[in-house]
Amino acid sequence: MTISVTEQIARLNDRCRQGFDPTARLVVTRACLARLAGEEDAVREIIAQAELLAAVRRYDFGPGDGPERDFGAFDLRGERIFFKIDYYDPALEFGSEDPADASLTRRVLTIMLAEDY
């Protein structure tokens, strides 16, 4: 069975969100982490990161989220959080030529406050 390019990208994005893509990068903006962790405390930051990752992993995409499943928004601890997956070449210098081809694409998952977007 053949799948569409859009569905292939969505599946690769799901793997990225679930933590199954060893080539993917994860970025949490400093403002997001600081807001959720409160004061600078390594333990609070680790807990905040774990909560963010869990929320991104369990995110349930709706019809308005787009077919590639590369963007989502949710509330956590009273904050509006966005996540976005971007596609880069293997050297992370330029955009990917083909986001449907895992060998040509490195995904970067960024988690941020809505106001950071």
Image: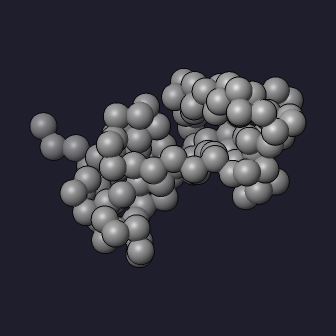
Q: Residue furthest left?
A: 1
**Along the line of sight, which residue is nearer the eye, 1 or 28?**
28
Q: Residue furthest bottom?
A: 94
Q: Quadrant of the C terminus?
A: bottom right
Which residue lies at the image location 21% right of the left edge and 57% below the top edge?
A: 103
Count of labels shown? 0
Colouring method of the image: one colour
Image side of residue 112 versus residue 80, left or right:
left
State whether residue 13 appears in this view.
Answer: yes
Give residue 38's position: percent from left, percent from top.
Answer: 86, 34
Q: Quadrant of residue 10?
A: top left
| 91 lies above or below 13 | below
Query: From the viewer's perspective, is residue 85 above or below residue 63?
Result: below
Relative to 20, is 42 on the left or the right?
right
Tell which of 1 and 46 is nearer to you: 46
Q: For the point 32% across and 43% down, which residue is it?
A: 22
Q: Quadrant of the N terminus?
A: top left
Q: Position of residue 95 (x, y in %)?
A: 41, 71
The residue under the point 41% across, 34% down is: 19
Seen from the viewer's position, the closer of residues 78 and 91 is 91
- Does residue 75 show up? no
Q: Position of residue 21 (x, y in %)?
A: 33, 41
Q: Residue 44 in the image: state x and y as whole percent.
A: 75, 28
Q: Quadrant of residue 116?
A: bottom right
Q: Nearer the viewer, residue 40 or 16?
A: 40
Relative to 5, say whether 95 is above or below: below
